[in-house]
């Protein structure tokens, strides 16, 4: 069963990369309810085995794309995020003092905290892309203009998967130009 879920996630990530055109250095926020993956209500039956499988696939995805990962904790830690210290420092995120555990942080964030290289917890990020496995509500951690990315495979196990990428805000009104070309970049 877990191997089937692993294949589902791998398929989702492959299609996501094809549509979102991820680039090295971008930050991917991951919200995940391992309870939902196994068909239980969010926050009731977190499982390390599912967290390990999901982390393994996301780590492989990170190695292939050069993105950074951020794992959202559950509501008991106010949806704080587990990231590597180097990412926090590079982006100017302030570390907070807490260690996620299954009952306050969730199985996924707890597993990530133990598996990541020099993990820390931060309260706020602005990620360029996101994956929400099990309707954990990651929108608060995405840059301001989030655009859904639709993929064929919509579930990992029993959990609904939602993907998003951010784009720059369109500002300026009717006279504004949004695509760069030589005609509209010269001043005359």
Image: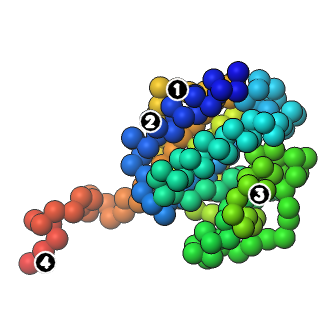
Coloring scheme of the render? rainbow
Indicate whether 70 appears above or below 20: below
The tag on residue 187 is 4
Query: Looking at this rendering, what residue extends furthest in the right direction?
Result: 103
Quadrant of res 3: top right
Q: Are marks 1 and 3 in contact (CB under 8 Å)?
A: no
Give the secondary structure at mark 3.
Answer: helix
Q: Which residue in the structure is indicated by mark 1?
A: 153
Residue 129 position, x and y percent, is: 52, 51
Indicate whether 31 appears above or below 42: below
Quadrant of res 156: top right
Q: Which residue in the structure is indicated by mark 2?
A: 15
The tag on residue 141 is none
Pointer 1 or 4: first along the chain: 1
Give the secondary structure at mark 2.
Answer: helix
Pointer 4 or 2: first along the chain: 2
Residue at image point 43% right, 52% down:
22
Camera-nearest label, 1 or 3: 3
């Amino acid at each position: 069963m877990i191997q089937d879920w692993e294949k589902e996630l791998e398929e989702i990530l492959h299609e996501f990369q094809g549509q979102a055109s991820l680039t090295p250095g971008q930050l991917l926020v991951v919200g995940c309810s391992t309870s939902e993956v196994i068909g239980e209500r969010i926050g009731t039956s977190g499982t390390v085995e599912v967290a390990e499988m999901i982390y393994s696939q996301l780590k492989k995805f990170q190695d292939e794309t050069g993105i950074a990962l951020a794992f959202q904790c559950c509501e008991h830690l106010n949806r704080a995020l587990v990231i590597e210290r180097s990412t926090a420092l590079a982006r100017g995120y302030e570390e907070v003092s807490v260690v996620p555990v299954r009952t306050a942080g969730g199985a996924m964030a707890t597993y990530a905290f133990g598996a990541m290289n020099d993990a820390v917890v931060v309260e706020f990020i602005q990620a360029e892309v996101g994956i929400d496995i099990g309707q954990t509500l990651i929108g608060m951690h995405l840059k301001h203009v989030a655009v859904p990315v639709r993929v064929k495979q919509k579930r990992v196990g029993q959990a609904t998967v939602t993907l998003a990428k951010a784009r720059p805000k369109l500002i300026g009104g009717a006279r504004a130009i949004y695509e760069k070309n030589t005609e509209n970049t010269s001043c005359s």
